Amino acid sequence: MLSFVNNNNDFGGRTQYVQWARNAGAQINSNDDFYTNPVLKGYYKNRVKRVITRFNTITGIAYRDDPTIMASGLMNEPRCQVDYSGRTITAWVQEMATYVKALDGKHLLEIGMEGFYGDSLL
């Protein structure tokens, strides 16, 4: 299973995306802008596309066609400190899941949540 990004700082995480955007001059208030800022979402989509369309250098198979990959994950343990209702993350998940499935309809896709987040009415 491939996780596209980590919520935490391990391997850069979403903090790295925020830093790249700030270095490029984007107005970023916090790491939680990752879920709503068009620049940050664009960076994420670029990464996702790069991974999904990558060809395995050993087998020559694109990741999106590789039967040895069971699933991918949008993010490891997503959190949004500015919105505990879950609405911000839910909107982000809907957008990114649609994007990922348009690129790769063969593999399972998971959110990466632990299962306790958000409003039970969503």
Image (cartoon, helix red, strand yellow):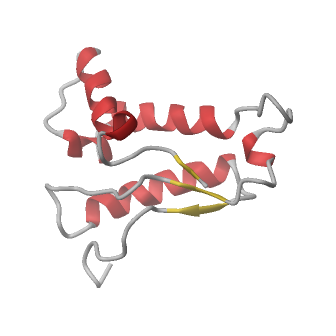
- Residue 81 in the image: above or below residue 86: above
Asked which quadrant contains residue 68, the reply is bottom right
Q: Position of residue 30 (x, y in %)?
A: 16, 39
The quarter of the rendered structure image containing the N terminus is: bottom right
Q: Position of residue 15 (x, y in %)?
A: 27, 35
Please count the marks in the image: 0
Q: Residue furthest bottom?
A: 121
Q: For this view, does 113 lie left or right of residue 84? A: right
Q: Position of residue 93 (x, y in %)?
A: 43, 58
* Viewer-nearest residue: 65 or 87: 65
Q: Position of residue 31 (x, y in %)?
A: 21, 40
- Residue 93 in the image: above or below residue 102: below
Q: Residue at x 50, y 45 (%)?
A: 4
Q: Residue at x 70, y 32 (%)?
A: 54
Q: Residue at x 76, y 32 (%)?
A: 55
Q: For this view, does 111 lie left or right of residue 78? A: right
Q: Residue at x 13, y 55 (%)?
A: 82
- Residue 114 in the image: above or below residue 101: below
* Viewer-nearest residue: 26 or 15: 15
The quarter of the rendered structure image containing the C terminus is: bottom left
Q: For this view, does 108 lie left or right of residue 46? A: right
